[in-house]
Amino acid sequence: MCGIAGKYRLDGAPVDRRLLKRMAGAMLHRGPDDEGFYVDGPFGMTMRRLSIIDLGAGHQPLCNEDGSVWVVFNGEIYNYVELRDELVARGHRFKTATDTEVIVHLYEDLGRDCVQPLRGMFGLAVWDERTRTLLLARDRLGKKPLYYSLRPGRALVFASELKALLEDAAVERDVDVEALDRYASLLYVPSPASIFRDVRKLPAGHTLVCTPEGASIHRYWDLPLPEPEPRPDAPERFHELLTEAVKIRLRSDVPLGAFLSGGVDSSAVVATMARLLNRPVVTTSIGFDDGDSELPYAAMVARHVGSEHHPRIVTAPSPELIERLVWHLDEPFADSSAVPTYFVSMAAREHVTVALSGDGGDELFAGYGRHRVEALEHRIRRVLGPRAGRAVARAAARLPVGTKGRNVLLDVGLPAEDGCARKFYFTPEVPRLKARLYSAWLRAETEKLDPLAPFRRAFRRAETADAVNRILNVDVATYLCDDILVKVDRMSMAHSLEVRAPLLDHKLVEFVATLPAAWKLNGGGSKVLLRSVLDGMVPRAAFDRPKHGFVSPIAGWLRRELAGYVEDTICSRRARERGYFDPAGVRALWAAHRSGQANFAHEIWMLLMLELWHRAFVDRGRP
């Protein structure tokens, strides 16, 4: 696991080596073990390395036999052993035992299609001296990040993290108002945009090719749509794919373990690890001092598989820690589950350097409430038809906000695309919230914007799928990539911990995506296929229960331990002078939450993280 960065001067001027040094230094946490540089006139790149494979000889940047192709790489290629054997058989010569070296030799054979055989997670850059071509690529699911800023005819600069990109003074820090509006609606900034107008995120499953003549972006992978066959062999085939996905992720030259929440997804991964390893799995879990956690279920699974288990209780984060999280997150990011992810990563790093996780299970197997609601709304629309659906929605609009079932009835009056997209607001009351909080200036700037546009685009790409698979496709293309995987990458890298997600092996993902909805959601039960495989591997009591989720008790933290800090931050003069929000609206929202009259924890956390981000990345000359 590493951090990569570089710059291509399209005007032909030489790259400043001091800039590369600063960019690498900004990502020290991503790679504390090694640093490397490569400069070729107008092009230069750098990396920080967290050594996982071939600890002594894996220095980057790394080149091919004649030094004409160079690579820097962040991530892991899990099938590198098999790829290496194929490349050697074709006449390529290797000088290391790293996964990185397979990339340069694949590039020699396949050009920009070198990403196609890769099975893993990656953000990478390949420099071709002969053609003066730069290739950037990001893995299929978006597990590893890659930011870039392109000024046509002048320069392209790229980095694993935004803070490294900002070491280049030419990258401007003007806030993108549309990205800000999406953050206030979703709690994160969806790709390909970033919070800055001058910076973009390379989308998952895409490559970027840059020459002095310009740059172009290409999609090389997309999630397949379901097939009509019933697939009675699904449990056996899925179990084979899961076992293989876990097995190849056990390749490591450093200590390896797993996160164990006690839920379905992590339990499936840990139980599979236990069957494959000839030693106890090292597992880590966290809970909170309010007593509401899955620690007892994690302990039950740990006892059953015989893992070396390390549970930990955590308390409210300090203001200093919150500010540290803001720095690591790079962009405004208000999914509060980043807090427990930070703590579980910290706890795991005390024992291992690599941890396997259960990420992806909810998005593949319909683990969220919105998936069941989408299926219900689809059935209602089919019964009512468009005209009756609109009449029901008009009647529902007269019900008090918060009435059970009101949002479902409102959605059935909408086109399916709109009803699906609305489920990705962090609260159904986002439009009402923004009307209450936005300043007159921000309302005017955003009134014609559509914060749900990325979800509508993803919906249209999967429009021929059934209702359940359709929303799962949207989830994988948006929320998984831009929220869940961002959180896991930044919080684990804050501790120089590599996290691997077997459920997001792209071959496993492709298989699950093609299955009928009944293998994912059947009646009121979710994760049908995953539970069927898990049955017998761990006690049924550990997974045959309602979903808990990886949540933190921020509502209470905000009212108690953090109350003074929050008020001093979101109601400060600095926050008011930014002009985004109406001060009276912010104070009213805070007063209602602090008094216990309402629970606006997510809204307050959103305001807090935005203000702290501004202070770290905009107010200061350098983060």
Image (cartoon, rainbow, N blue to C red):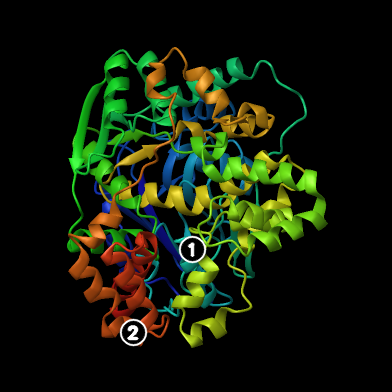
Q: Are marks 2 and 1 in contact (CB under 8 Å)?
A: no
Image depth: mark 2 or mark 1 in front = 2
Mark nearer the N terminus (2 vs 1): 1
Tell me, for residue 136, which label it has, or none. Answer: none
Front residue of 161/73: it is 161
Residue 10 pos. (x, y %): 54, 72
Q: Secondary structure at mark 1?
A: loop
Observer able to see residue 9? no
> What's the residue at 27%, 61% (across, down)?
25
Per the image, the residue denoted by label 2 is: 576
Total labels drawn: 2
Quadrant for the N terminus in the image: top left
Give the class, few, some or many, for how many residues have Cα within 10 Å of label 1's Cα (few <14, many ≥20).
many
Please determine whether, in this image, residue 149 is positioned above or below residue 81: below
> What's the residue at 44%, 48% (across, down)?
484
> What's the residue at 27%, 42% (across, down)?
345
Residue 430 pos. (x, y %): 51, 66
Per the image, the residue denoted by label 1 is: 189
Give the class, few, some or many, for how many residues have Cα within 10 Å of label 2's Cα (few <14, many ≥20).
some
- Identified by mark 2, the residue type is Arg
